[in-house]
Every structure is written in C-alpha cells, then in structure tokens.
Amino acid sequence: MYEYIISILPQAMRLTVPILFAGLGGVLASRSGVLNIGLEGSMLVGALAGVIGSYLSGNPWLGLLLAILAGGIIGIMFDLFALTLGAPQAVVGAAINIFSTGITAYVFRIIFATTSDTVSVNGFSSLKIPVLGDIPLLGEIFFDHNVLMYLAFLLVLVMHVYLYYTTGGLNLRSCGENSKASDSVGIKVVQTRYITTILSSVLASVGGVALSIGNVNTFVEGMSSGKGFIALAALTFGRWSPLGVMLAAFLFGLVDAFQLRLQVSIVDAPYQYYQMLPYIVTIIVLVWTSQTGVTGPKTGEYFEKETK
Amino acid sequence: MNSVVMQKIVKKFGSFCANDNVDFTLKKGEIHALLGENGAGKTTLMNILYGIYAADQGSIFINEKEVEITSPRVAMSYGIGMVHQHFMLVPNFTVAENIALGTKERFWLKKSLVERDIAELSQKYGLKIDPMAKVANLSVGEQERVEIMKALYRKAEILILDEPTAVLTPQETEALFVVLRNLAENGVSIIIITHKLDEVMAITDRVTVLRLGRKVATVETKETTKRELAKMMVGHEVFLNIQKPKVEAGETILELNNVCARENDTEKLKNVSFSVRAGEIVGIAGVDGNGQSELARSIAGLFEITEGEILLSGEKINGTSVENIIKKGLSYIPEDRLKDGLIGDFSIEDNFIIQILNNFTKHGLLQKKVIKKNAERLIKEYDVRSKGPTQQAKLLSGGNQQKLIFARELERSPKLLLAVQPTRGLDIGAIEYVWGRINEAKKNGVAVLLISTELDEILTLSDRILVMYEGKIVGEPIENRDVDIQKLGLLMAGVEQDGDFSNAS
C-alpha cells in the first residue's frame, strides 16, 4: 500500500499543477472581491493557445506567451462586462465558460483542419534539478518535472508574501472584505479588481497550458473537463489563501492520479466510475467546507462610486 | 485663523437643492456643530468638503488658501479626515492593519512601525487602543476610536464626525467627548454633524444650523439655549414635552419565559423573561446589536426560538405562524421601514391592506373601490402627506412612511404594539407624531413594547425600563420615575453591578 501511494505521487504532482494555477488565480480575484467562475473557460482557452503557439513556432515558450495574452483578453472581457457595465459576475463567468467551449472548438478545427486526429506539438520537457533531483524518492516526486510545475510552487510563495506582508497585499485584501472602507481611504477598488481579475484569468490560462503542452502535448476539445471548477472548490477548501489552495489542489491531484491508476490496474469496472472520483471528492469537500460556516471574502458585489 | 471656509456652496440633485448658498467657517482648534434635521443638508455639505460630492457652485478655503477638493484622497492631503456614521473598517483586520490601510509609502507592511506610530498618537491625544486587536472584537466605542486614530494617522488637522454618538452608550459618549476636547486643545479643528441638542450644548464652541438646505445661523454655544437651537432647526417653536398619560395597567398581554435563541453558533437571546401589561409601555434599552432585533423578530414570529415560550394573552405563540400571531393581536413596527415595514414598489393603498387582504376581496377579487376608500380615510386620519392613494410607498418621506405603517398597524386594534426604533431617522415633527401615537395606543389599553437604542425615547415613553446586553436582560426592571441614567448606562455597557443583580445565584 505504501509503495503504491508513493508510486502515484509524481503523477499526482503533475495533475496538481493546472488546478493550482487556476486556484491561485481564484485567490487573487476573490481576495479583491471578484467571483471569477470563468476560470474553466480561461483554462480551456489557455490550453488551446499554448498548443497553437507551440505549433506555429515550434517553441513551447511562445505557446505560453500566447496563452498569457489570450487569458488576458478573457480577463478584460470579464472586467468590461462585470466591473464596468455591472453585469452579475456569476452570469459573466458562466458566459465566458460557454463562449470558451465554442471558440476553442471552432479555432482548433480551423487551424488544424481536423476533428479526430490528434495533433502533436512541442511541449515543455521535464527539467530535472541537479543534485535535488537525484535524492531518492523525493527527487522523483518534487524535482523532476517541467518548468511550469516549479513556477506554480514559486508563485504560491510569492503570492503568500505579497498578500500578507506588503501594503499592496493588505489593500488588495481589503477590497474583498469591505470595499467601502477601501474606497474611503483612497484605494482604487475597481482598478484593483480589474488587475486581479485579468491576472486570475491569465493564471487559469497558464493552468490550461500545463494541461496541454505541459503534459500531453496536444489539444482535445473540452480538455479542461471541469478542472477550473475543481479549482474553485480548491479555493473554498483552501480558505482563499495561496498555501491552503496549494494543499487543496494537491488533494484533488492525488485523487485524480489515484483514479487513473485504478483505470489501468482494476479493469473490471467501467472506467467512467473511476473518472467520477475527483468530482465526487469535490462535492464531498464542498459540502464539508460549507458546513464549517467559515465565510470567505465578499465576492460578487458590483462596486460603484457614489454619484458625484 | 480659519481652518475651513466654505463660501456660497450650492449643490443640486436633480431639481432638489441640497445646499443653497451655504456659508460655513471653522476656526482652528474649535469644536463646531453642524446642526439640522434629516435632509437639512449637513451631510451633503460635509461630503463636499471631503471630496465625495462636487459642489455645483461655491469655493472652499483650507487654512486660508483656496483649494479644489475632487476626491477623499485630495481632502486627506489637505489634512481633512472624516469619521463616517457607518464605520469604514475591515472587521477581519487588526487595528494596525486598518489604520495602515490605503497607505502606499512603503512596499513592505511593517506592522511594528505602524504600531509605534499608533502608540505615539495614543500617548499624545489620550486615545487608548490596542493596535493588535482584531476590529471585529472591539466594542462600538473602541471602533470609533480606531476611526479617529485612522484620521490622525493620516495627519488630519480637520476632523469631521458624522453623528458620532448615534451608537454609543452615555459613558462611551462621555469618553469620546474627553478625547475630542483633548484633540481640540492640541489644535485639531473638529466638525460634528448632529441633530442632538444635548450633545451640541455639552461639547461644542460654536453651532451652525442648517434647515432645508439653507444656513439659518452660526452662533456661539455659550450664548444660545437648546430651545433656541430647536426653534432654528425646525423653523418654529417646538415643545417636545410629551406628557406621559396615566393609565392603570391591566392584565398581562405579553409574557416571555426563559426565551433562548441562536443563530448559527452564536446565542442571540439568553433566558429572556419579562411581561408587558395592557396600558403599559415597557422600554427595552441597550446598545444596537445586543439581541434587540432578534427579540423583536422572535415575538413577531420571524425568528425561531430554541427554548422557552412566548405568550400573547396567555396563549403560546412561538412555533405558530405569523398569520396567527397577527390574528391574536400583534401590531409590529419593524426597525427597517423600507425593508420589513412596507413594500416600497407597491402603492400606499395596497400597503394598507397587505395583512388583511381577505377583508378586501370578494370571490377572490380585490375590491378596488373599497381599498381606495380605506386608503383615503387612513391617509386623512393619520395625516400621511402624499400625492394620493396610488403613490408608491417608497416615494414618501421617512416620516410619512412611518405614519403609513402606524395607520395600518393601529387600525387593526391590536392588543400588543411592538415598536422597534420607531423614530430612527425621523425629524422632530415626525418624532413628536410617533410618540403621540404610541401614547395614544397606551391610553387605549394597548400593551406596548418599545425597543430602542435612543435613550431619550425610552425615558420619554416607558413606564418600566429593561436593559438588554449580549442577549440578556440585565438588572431588574426599572420604574421610570426613579431612573438613574448613570446606572442605566453601566447596564448598557455590560458592567456588572454589585449586590442585587450579580449572576452568582
């Protein structure tokens, strides 16, 4: 049993990365008072943009760059509708998810002129860290992955420090707690939320890159398959903090790796049952966290300055 | 020297003129009251000074220099600080974090530096605050101090306080006054927006009175009287000497026995027991948020109690329906008129009949003519100033909305009148009206339970006074003829008394 668990850990780490990126995006948005349920859509767009960028240039880094741009555009769309025009954030987020499903399928078919054949592009290869990567067991689990993985964990640290140890972080968090108070001391609430939402969409998009050219080196329609929503669950479970989200994302990654292993090791049951596992865990976790009665930042409100 | 001079300020909202050529002068180091009824334009004027609104006309001078104040940020840069009526604090942050909020001078959040600055200011002005405490755990009085500290930390030399004592106990108010005097002696100029005359007399050096958007006068506090100020404020002589009608109390109408209630994991009501008799007004005093609204909502059947029982005319009403409670004779004046008392989008006539719809239907159809007649009669009897029965309720002034509710509730000949904050936000004329109606109900043998955070109101109307603190009734019922304000204040602040009512037994 012990060895079994150890053996799925490297895989679990890989599966954690996309959820972690999107979850960290969720932390930024929700801490500033925005409910971005469009993470799923941003992720899907990022996954495709990564593949296109890498396909056109042969360089996965340019794929990442294209995904960052695409995620940024999705973020700006969200901001425009939800923060400037005042549409309900949940509705805008849902619209972005639906929009992304359509636009990615469409663009994918146009560029690759295929619906069934898999397209393979250059992805990020594994980057074994010298010395650390040679440590038995730990090396394999933590220090033998592609660059996106290291980036994700570095980001956890950076965000933690920024949110809790800088004045900028304090100001950002206040927007998600009591935006009127923030406004009254001269913090630009809408501007702050514009930036965090764009960043959250960009991060989810990078999470999508981790799914496509950071893992399977191809794009499949609808390949985010709810990971953006799982990231939202991780966000709640992780108490809207970078460290918490990291642990929560790892839990979901672990369950995902476990079900993949079950698919190959126990083939008696239809594999769909195993595939359900991460989602079932998501539901259980969400129900459980909502029972604790801890409420997070106030998200979803439309902030409007008092009329002059 | 003058800290602030505002000249010929005009501010219009649509066709409504909130400030009409208002002049205002604040001298350095003085405490200046801006006095007026609701809607007189006090807050508008100060919002212009603080950069929240832009004036349509007029000019502002700070320290004798003409300035243009386009946002609160600009106002702060001129040394103006504002303590809003609804505190602008983040409950989940510590005091130090709240005070540092919005500052951008440093990248790193150095709490030790902020805490040192707070300690210095505390020392200088005698403002005691624990910088490490979480704001959510502070009392309202302490939160007010945090707000003042926030302004001082931003180097405010001109401090605007909007209704600062609205939510304070008498002791907290006194403590606040000490702080304010201290600040003024140290050269801080202070403006207090208020409609409380006692407060003006107690603390200010000068008063500017506004009425209907115009300045009435600026006078030295020493040279005026409460009566004169009231007259300036309202425009005519007012006598708020409401006589308490003498009524022999009858049978017990409302009785609460060991009522407990909780919301989520917090206990909202703890063993509340008391009774109200016919022809008697029982006042429940206490600082806002000590379980008063839960108590009211429990009696009205809107909040589930976990233990104990509530009897109306000897019959248990808890656990039954709201409809049943109304039928048994409850009339309820809720604390939030527009949210719970009325349907704002409905017409006046429809609002009159919402609980007794069946009396106005025939074969399931509304009897429009009867409804209109009913409305016309009530509008006249209760003096609801409106454009007619079909006007939307939300378009009425606060006072007239309250008259509408009183008309509807008293018309049902209740046994029990439950009035919660019945005069909140009303002007003197309307307050007089509401108090008169409550006394009249008492004369008619109605049992009245008055829940209010305004001590004045409680003292003016009640026969017996109970104090609520953290969901409990503290102390013994106090007969209104031998009331000791000091003692009442201590009870409201939750300070345990020796002897009689310790919890030892």
Image: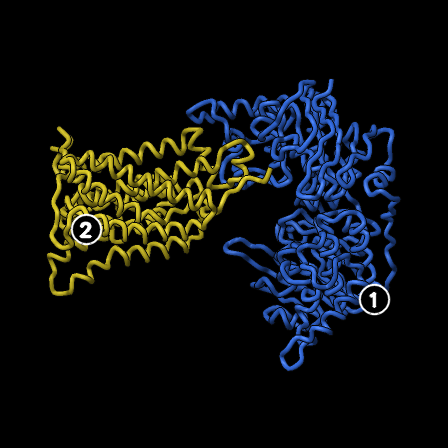
Q: Label 1: few (<14), some or many (≥20) within 10 Å?
A: some
Q: Which residue is mark 2?
A: A109
Q: CA distance from mark 1 to mark 2?
A: 82 Å
Image quarter for residue A191?
top left
Image quarter for residue B311?
bottom right
Single out the mark in the foreground, 1 or 2: 2
Quarter containing the N terminus of chain B: top right
Q: Are marks 1 and 2 in contact (CB under 8 Å)?
A: no
Name the side, left or right, on which A218 lies relative to B169.
left
Residue ID at (77%, 64%): B447
Residue ID at (68%, 54%): B395
Residue A161 location, x and y as percent? 36, 31
Image quarter for residue A125?
top left
Q: Which of these two is toward me, B408 or A294?
A: B408
* Up-down relation of residue A252 to residue A206 (above or below): below
Q: Is residue B476 visible?
A: no
Q: What label sits on residue B444 in the rendered view?
A: 1
**Labels 1, 2: one chain:** no
Residue B377 location, x and y as percent? 79, 67
Q: Label 2: few (<14), some or many (≥20) within 10 Å?
A: some
Q: Chain of mark 2?
A: A
The chain shown in blue is which?
B
Residue B31 location, x and y as percent? 74, 27
* Up-down relation of residue A186 to residue A306 (above or below): above
Q: Secondary structure at mark 2?
A: helix
Q: Colour of chain A?
A: yellow
**Amino acid type at mark 1:** Asn
Q: Secondary structure at mark 1?
A: loop
**Amino acid type at mark 2:** Arg
